Amino acid sequence: MDPRAARARARAGATGPTAGWAPGHTQANLVSVPADWAYDVLLFCTRNPRPCPVLDVTDPGSWRTALAPDADLRTDIPRYRVWEHGRLVDEPTDVTPYWRGDLVSFLIGCSFTFEGALAEAGVPLRHVEQGRNVSMYVTRRACRPAGRLHGPMVVSMRPVPAALVSTARRISGLLPAVHGAPVHEGDPAGLGIRDLSRPDFGDPVVAEPGDVPVFWACGVTPQAAVMASRPPFAITHAPGRMLVTDVRDSEYRVGD
Amino acid sequence: MDPRAARARARAGATGPTAGWAPGHTQANLVSVPADWAYDVLLFCTRNPRPCPVLDVTDPGSWRTALAPDADLRTDIPRYRVWEHGRLVDEPTDVTPYWRGDLVSFLIGCSFTFEGALAEAGVPLRHVEQGRNVSMYVTRRACRPAGRLHGPMVVSMRPVPAALVSTARRISGLLPAVHGAPVHEGDPAGLGIRDLSRPDFGDPVVAEPGDVPVFWACGVTPQAAVMASRPPFAITHAPGRMLVTDVRDSEYRVGD
């Protein structure tokens, strides 16, 4: 499946999650806000580059992105979330009816981007093996606030065999534009997570014996900031349902 | 010289350049604009991360930065440039008289940050050997515009022995927050640079036999955008005269 086919599949109604779609191509989180909130969102992302690495920002009203020139941001994500004053009001597969001329859209790096590189290096992806969405958790680590925007860091978790944790750390670390190295390894309590079997977003993923939970900063973080900071209106992707872009993962790898 | 001593030296009137001050500590470019231009500047930086990697953004009016909590952005840079409608109107060593309550300041990564790592790896730094400021050039490569902001990419150039170019590329590539890998190596004409002996900023630097000119994206780029885009008011550092921060260079290295 190439990126164009992946987006066509989303447009035709497939609801994801998108992990494993169009391997080798970067996937992106979406958050769209009215233009008068755009500076706060961009500053929030700049001040919190690990969870919120910005890959592209649109001009107001535009549903086009440089990351995938023929994509339509209103239809090409498998499922969206629509927010009013921080409250989830709809989860449609098409946000054309909700679109506004003043919306500025932020495309934010996604950890799915380094999963191909992890798999190539022999790091098993338990959620893919189990046919589930990755587990995501709201932590008690606060992001650095920006203007009216504040909120906790959200992380994704992958169980990794202990002997492969350093490999996973090294490989993801070379992709800082898509969250980079883990923010935490081991005891979930270090991030204030009580129960790994009850993720805040996504599905529970079963660890194999000898696996260590490894946590990466997650692009759902801006969504948590929208929930906490209550802008009058926002559109985001639904967790795990990403925009598949035309950009090769290798474009974001440093140190080659 | 530690970073605090370096800033005290600037505050006391030393005019730089700052290459080699407080080795191992990150130096930063400054651009301050009125708040109603801040979104355009931040978006310009986001869209042009190679020349404009943002390390910190202040709140309006604040002269404090998280990169050096006791620094005063109005006095601790050796020399400033003051701009009105894109025209250079002053080059003071202290901008306290020019400061305004609506100024938002951007601290942008500087290639001096990777010079320590280059030197450690045996890559000679000709401008340091020759006691000169690094050579900087305006290229004919346009940055991606953002709102009212547009302009050409500026680069710094270091002559590197041919056998060490790949080392220089690899080492700087691990520091994407301070411009990362070179944007060009070899023939200056590839960037539209006519004469290496006549830099647009900084000093001419003499190459040794067998050296290849290596070009990195440069944090003077926002200054070129100010010149081209003519915001009513702006303050920048003078090229080569940076803010010495408390942050260790190693903080910005990926892949460790």
Image (spheres, coloured by chain):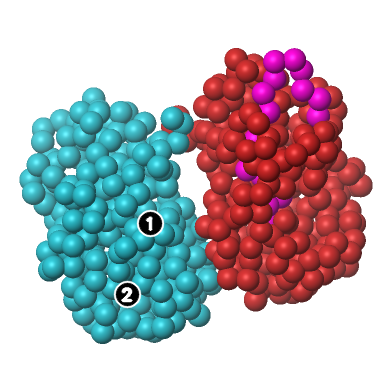
Chain colours: A cyan, B red
The single residue placed furthest to the left in the displayed view is A130
Query: Which tag is nearer the camera, tag 2 or tag 1?
Result: 1
Q: Position of residue A83 (x, y in %)?
A: 30, 79
Q: Amino acid at mark 1?
A: Leu
* x and y percentages locating residue A114 in the rendered image: 30, 41
Alpha carbon distance from label 2 to label 1: 19 Å
Q: What amino acid type should be assigned to the residue bearing mark 2? A: Ile
The answer to whether the residue labelled 2 contacts the one labelled 1, judged by CB atoms less than 8 Å apart, is: no
User: Dot 1 surroundings within 10 Å: few (below 14), some, or many (20 or more)?
Assistant: many
Q: Does label 2 or label 1 sit earlier along the sequence?
A: 1
Of residue B110 and residue B74, the one placed in the foreground of this image is: B110
Q: Residue at x 15, y 54 (%)?
A: A133
Residue at image point 17% right, 34% down: A124
Query: Which of the labelled discs sits on residue A235, or is there none?
Result: 2
Relative to A243, residue B153 above or below? above
In this figure, which residue is indicated by the disc labeled 1?
A67
Quadrant containing the N terminus of chain B in the rendered view: top right
Q: Please check the rendered image and state whether residue B220 is part of the magenta-colored stretch, yes or no.
A: yes
Disc 2 crowd rating (10 Å Cα; few below 14, some 14-19, many 20+) is: many
Residue A113 position within the rendered picture, expressed as x and y whole percent measured from the top left: 30, 46
Start-end of magenta stretch:
B205-222
Of the pair A41 and A87, the residue shown nearer to us? A41
Per the rendering, the mark at residue A148 is: none
Q: Toward the viewer: B171 or B202?
A: B202
Q: Name the residue at 25% across, 59% down.
A: A242
Left or right of B50 in this view: A154: left
The reply to whether residue A1 is visible in this rendering is yes
* Residue A141 x/y as whole percent: 39, 56
Q: Is residue B230 magenta?
A: no
Answer left or right for A247 relative to A129.
right
Q: Is residue B216 above or below residue A151?
A: above
User: Could you say whether the residue bearing mark 2 is in a helix, strand or loop?
Assistant: strand
